[in-house]
Every structure is written in C-alpha cells, then in structure tokens.
C-alpha cells in the first residue's frame, strides 16, 4: 500500500514558554519615578563626593569643632527662649489680673453713678409733682396726669406685641422700604404707630413695659433694640393704656393703625393680643422736662 507522504514537523523554531507579564507594566512612568527617585545628576554628585571623601560627617578637627559650636549655639538659643517665656508667663498673668480688677472697679463706679442718676431723677420728678400740686390750683391734678408726672390707675386696655417665632422671614408687605429689611421683628416705627393710634382712639395715659410715655417721649431704634426715652426695651412689649377699656379696644382695632398691626401679624407672623382691662396701673414718668414755664401770679399782684 502506498499512502500520502506526511509533512515532517518543523523543528527550526522550537516553541518556548511565554514569560508572565509584570503587574506594573501599565504604570511604567510611575515605576520609573519610584526606581529613580534621585536625579542622575544628584546621584553622580553624591558618588563623586563619596569617592573624594568630602561627603558625610566632617573629618577634620576644625570642621568637627565648627559643628559642635553650631549645635551649642542652637541649643543655647532654644534654652534662652524657653527661659524667657517661662519668666514672662507670670508677668502676663499678673497684668491680666490687674486689668480684670481695673475693669471691675470701673464697672462698680459706673453702676454707682447710674444709681445716683436714678436717685436724682426721682428727686427731680418728686419736686416737679409737688410744684404742680402747689401752683396748679384746681387743675394741678389734671396737668400732672396729662404731663405724665403722676401715677395713674383705672380701666383700660392691655396690648402685647412680640416678635415672630422665626424672626428672619422676609417678603413684601406694609413695612416694605429700602432702609429696613422686612422681617418678623417688631420695629420702632411699629411701636410709634401703635402708641399714636392708642392716643388718637382716646387713651389718657400710655406706658410700654412699665415706661411711662409723655408728650416729649421718643421711640427710637438702636440696631434691633427699641429705645423709649433712651431706655432699651426687650420683647414682648406690653403696652398699657388708660381709658374706656372696651370702647378703646374696639376703636383701636378698627383704626388704620390697628389694621396695620393686623397686617403685620398676617404677613410677618408678629404675635399680638389685645384685651380690655378693668384696672391697669401706670407709673409716673421718671422726670418731666419743663421747657417753657412761668410762675402763676395771684390777682392784684404784679
């Protein structure tokens, strides 16, 4: 039998096993940086110094003495700095204690002067009230009532105004202006409108947080604080007014100023409440400033 000749296997290029691929083959740049972290120039310079014997620690006695002197000077500087800081600490503490003591003394002196001013103001108010009673005749009591020089009590209304629970809400509304941001805080101009509205509706005497108002009283602002006659008030603001309680309450709520207060409540969340009272008590004003006055002359005298 004859068969097909078979092709002998090619043995010219024997098969060789493939070498495994390095895990960091894809990071050749990073590998090169890590393997050659020192620049070639620096490496050559370091090798040359090592060959010449000039690298490493100083070898000569002079160089060693210089290094020792430098280390001693550095240690001396650190020691002196630490010693100075340790010495200065008690001095600083003493100066701080002296400053605190001085602040306490000045604060006590200011409180003493403030109490003296209050005493003198009350004394002036008492003298003014006595003068009104003495020279006012049958109208002295009425003059004292209208001027706020005497304490009063009677029926009236109690109006409480407080900031909104979240006093940072904004938006347009009846107080929209370029000078103030419309928030849920009660402003000085709000209190001005409330007080003027009560006067116009028939109030005979008005006080805010125990501060009696007179014809010369001023309601102003200092930042977010409301000042009445230069005395700061804190919310809630309790306004007491003497007058016909039920009638005064109704007239005020129906007045433009009462509607303005209602708009503040609806638009800004300012909390308000008003109620008629059978009896309210208002203190006298601390002092009444007399700008124009002349003594009363009896008939027949010049």
Image (cartoon, helix red, strand yellow):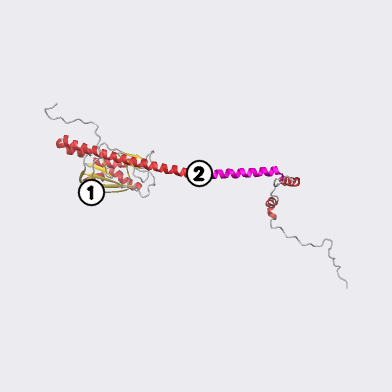
Q: Which of these two is toward me, 255 or 92? A: 92
Residue placed under numbered mark 2 in the picture: 87
Name the element at disc 2: helix
Q: Position of residue 175 (x, y in %)?
A: 35, 41
- Residue at image position (18%, 38%) is 142
Q: Is residue 279 above or below residue 218?
A: below
- Which of the numbered marks, if any, corresponds to residue 276? 1
Q: Earlier in the sequence, mark 1 or mark 2?
A: 2
Q: Nearer the viewer, mark 1 or mark 2?
A: 2
Q: In which quarter of the image is residue 140?
A: top left
Residue with the most extreme top position:
302
Q: Is residue 14 above or below residue 53?
A: below
Say if residue 181 shows up in the picture.
no
Q: Which image quadrant: the C terminus?
A: top left
> In the image, is residue 227 part of the stretch drawn in magenta?
no
Name the element at disc 1: strand
Residue with the most extreme bottom position:
1
Q: Which image quadrant: the N terminus?
A: bottom right
Q: Position of residue 204 (x, y in %)?
A: 21, 41
Mark 1 and 2 residues: CB-CB less than 8 Å, in contact?
Answer: no
Region of the chain picked out in magenta, as a range: 59-83
User: Which SS type dominates the magenta stretch?
Assistant: helix
Q: Residues within 10 Å of mark 2 (few under 14, many from 20)?
A: few
Q: Position of residue 147 (x, y in %)?
A: 22, 37
């Amino acid at each position: 039998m004859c068969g097909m000749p078979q092709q002998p296997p090619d043995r010219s290029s024997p098969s060789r096993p493939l070498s495994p691929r390095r895990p960091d083959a894809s990071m050749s740049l990073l590998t090169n940086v890590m393997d050659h972290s020192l620049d070639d120039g620096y490496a050559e310079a370091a090798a040359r110094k090592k060959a010449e014997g000039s690298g490493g620690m100083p070898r000569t006695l002079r160089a060693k003495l210089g290094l020792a002197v430098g280390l001693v000077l550095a240690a001396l500087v650190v020691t002196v700095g630490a010693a100075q800081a340790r010495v200065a600490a008690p001095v600083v503490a003493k100066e701080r204690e002296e400053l605190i003591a001085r602040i306490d003394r000045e604060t006590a002196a200011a409180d003493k002067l403030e109490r003296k001013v209050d005493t003198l103001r009350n004394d002036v108010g008492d003298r003014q009230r006595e003068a009104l009673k003495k020279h006012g005749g049958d109208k002295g009591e009425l003059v004292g009532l209208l001027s706020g020089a005497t304490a009063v009590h009677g029926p009236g209304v109690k109006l409480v105004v407080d900031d909104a629970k979240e006093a940072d809400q904004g938006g347009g509304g009846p107080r929209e202006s370029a000078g103030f941001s419309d928030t849920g805080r009660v402003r000085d101009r709000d209190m001005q409108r409330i007080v003027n509205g009560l006067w116009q509706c028939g109030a005979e005497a008005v006080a805010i947080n125990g501060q009696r108002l007179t014809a010369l009283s001023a309601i102003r602002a200092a930042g977010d604080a409301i000042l009445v006659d230069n005395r700061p008030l804190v919310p809630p603001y309790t306004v007491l007014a003497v007058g016909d309680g039920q009638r005064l309450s109704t007239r005020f709520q129906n007045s433009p100023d009462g509607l303005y207060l209602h708009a503040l409540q609806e638009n800004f969340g300012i909390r308000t409440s008003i109620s008629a009272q059978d009896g309210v008590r208002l203190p006298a004003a601390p002092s009444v400033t007399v700008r124009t006055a002349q003594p009363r002359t009896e008939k027949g005298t010049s």
